[in-house]
Image (cartoon, helix red, strand yellow):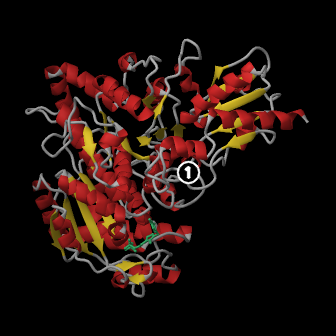
Amino acid sequence: MPIKTKKFDDIAINTIRFLAVDGVQKANSGHPGMPMGCAQIAYTLYSKFMKHNPANPHWLNRDRFVLSAGHGSMLLYSILHLCGYGVSMDDLKNFRQWNSKTPGHPEFGLTPGVETTTGPLGQGISNAVGMALAEAHLGAIFNKNDIKILDHFIYGICSDGDLMEGISHETASIAGHLKLGKIIFFYDNNHISIDGSTSLAFSEDIPKRFEAYDWHVQHVKDVNNVDDLQKAIEAAQKVTDKPSLIVTDTHIGYGSPHKQDTAGAHGSPLGEEEVKLTKKNLNWSEDKTFYIPDEVASFYKEVKADGKKAEEEWNELFEKYKAKYPDDAELFTRVMNGETGDEWKNHLPVFEDDGKPVATRTSSGKTINSIAPYLTGFLGGSADLHPSTDTFMNDYGSLSADHYENRSIHYGVREHGMASILNGMAMYGGVIPFGATFFVFSDYLRPAIRLASLSGVRPIYVFTHDSIGLGEDGPTHQPIEHLAAIRAIPGVVVIRPADANESAYAWQAAIEHKGSPVALILTRQKLPVIDQNKYASAKNLLKGAYILKDSEGTPDIILMATGSEVSIALEAGEKLNSDGIKARVVSFPSWELFEMQPEDYKETIFPKSVRARLSVEAGVSQGWTKYITEDGDSLGIEHFGASAPLKDVMKGYGFTAENVYDTASKVLAKNKK
Ligand SMILES: Cc1ncc(C[n+]2csc(CCOP(=O)(O)OP(=O)(O)O)c2C)c(N)n1
């Protein structure tokens, strides 16, 4: 790229700035201030540093850019447009409009060049940590001393709000601990948030805080000095064993005579008059909107051409890699395409009904360890609960700064951070990441679970200790409303297996599923292994619900249950049968998988004519009406649990075969009237 003069830099920066200002003004909605203050950073990164090919936003070895301060989305859309990504001038003019590619906050999968969904503050910088972790892990597996096929940076911009949020503390801490040196983040230090000056609520020393996390910290005092920005990026690139934070003093609403350095520039358009005054102030043509000077347009053509060349060079490198390491190259291609092959399925463990009960967390742990050798890129961790969640990969060791190739990640007690890191990894691709904790703490992951689903990526959550059945730890640890709460997030596939064999197939379902998160809900307590010779095959879990046990003809009643309650429903069903009642018992591990089945399959499980139905699940019954009809009933728990041994708690709240039998009898009586 030819060296440009300061004058050109200013024009190129103003082009970004005013595309953003005009976009927000035209939409009459949005956040102009952040793009106005950070246009210099976007310009410097995208045109002088980043290896990226706008013609192919999916090039595997591209540098990533994460706009953690997602409210500044017009900054990203403007630079993407200028660089020649698939964001047209019309898209910029349709900012925040119905069906546009330029939504209020960046959305992964919608806009070419948008690497992650941001807006909820703190998530973007945390996703970046996940991306860096995925790069480090896959790099450790596939890079060779002589050829590095994955070797790039993860750049980004975070704001005051990002750094106030607790999640960024969690993930900055682990990024420093894991020495993720490819992360280079700018901190938009403009001292303004929505309420006004950040001094109202925020007075810690950010550089010191990040130094304490073992980040490499620099301070650029004048964001308008592009040379200083460049020097800081160069220095950050050289520090390979620490993530970098470049604290940059910026001005929200830069150039606006009445709004610069005020919260007024944050979340509303400048206003027609102020836009004109700002343009005048910055020597920009007042009458032109969405204006791109010719010299700027041709400059970005060069940027685009350089990007194409960069990818071509990488393609040549990959050809060399292929010639020298053909097996690795083949595996790399498969893994990055998300192809798992089928071999791993042959290694799903089978559990015999030998009279010994098994907790589904235990059988899940066995499954993870059995299939791991056949799934490159399958890695997981827990928020300091490996022994309790049974998620350690015994043959693959703890992932650390010295061993990025290992597969068991110690997230520490950082659930929210873990979930957001999982999202970053999933968006990066090539890995199948899972994260584990107690189900009750799914609340701590929830904001990131929602974003995973919105983004169309598939992290897997291993949530154990899934009900009051965990016993003595008591109500603080006993999930009650959590199944309903997680099912309420659109797209999340929730699977609560009934026994050891169902848990193995739950993993199959999770790994085969694409495009949204999967939550495995597992028990702490041991459960009987359901005899597949006597009852249906656990493989039917893949259909979400199936008839475990039936009787001749149309059933008098359908008992449906999930997880640990299936075996008590089965026992109750047997007892009803022996009374001459035609009871069908349905194992119903996943509403979402069931809803994916054809209507005729659904009808075979729940014939419309059978209205006497009972659901059994140790959680709030909210949502079950859909399956039990108004004529059925739910055996659930509508209040918090209690601290006592498992048997007492389950009995105390009615989760026994006897009570299922009694409740079913009442449902039958009600339906006879
Ligand atoms: C988790 C979360 N809480 C609240 C908001 C609403 N919000 C958007 S921007 C912002 C703070 C703005 O301050 P700052 O991050 O410094 O951005 P700047 O105004 O400097 O662009 C808030 C509270 C949000 N987007 N995400």
Q: Which residue occupies the extreme top position in the image?
A: 533
Q: Position of residue 342 (x, y in %)?
A: 39, 18
**In the image, the residue with mark 1 has its CB under 8 Å from the nearest atom of ligand 1:** no
Residue at the spot of label 1:
480
Residue 495 point in image, percent of width and height: 52, 35
Q: Position of residue 29 (x, y in %)?
A: 54, 70
The local secondary structure at tag 1 comes to: loop
Where in the figure is residue 188, as x and y percent of width and height? 30, 71
Q: Quadrant of residue 663?
A: top right
Image point (53%, 17%), residue name:
531
Q: Quadrant of ligand 1?
A: bottom left
Compared with residue 590, is residue 253 higher up or lower down, i.e. above or below? Answer: below
Task: Give the vertical position of 300 relative to 405 (above or below).
Answer: below
From the viewer's perspective, is residue 83 above or below residue 14?
A: above
- Crowd around label 1: few <14 · some 14–19 · many ≥20 (10 Å): many
Q: Amino acid at mark 1?
A: Ile
Split into 4 quadrants, where in the image is the C terminus?
A: top right
Residue 284 position by quadrant: bottom left
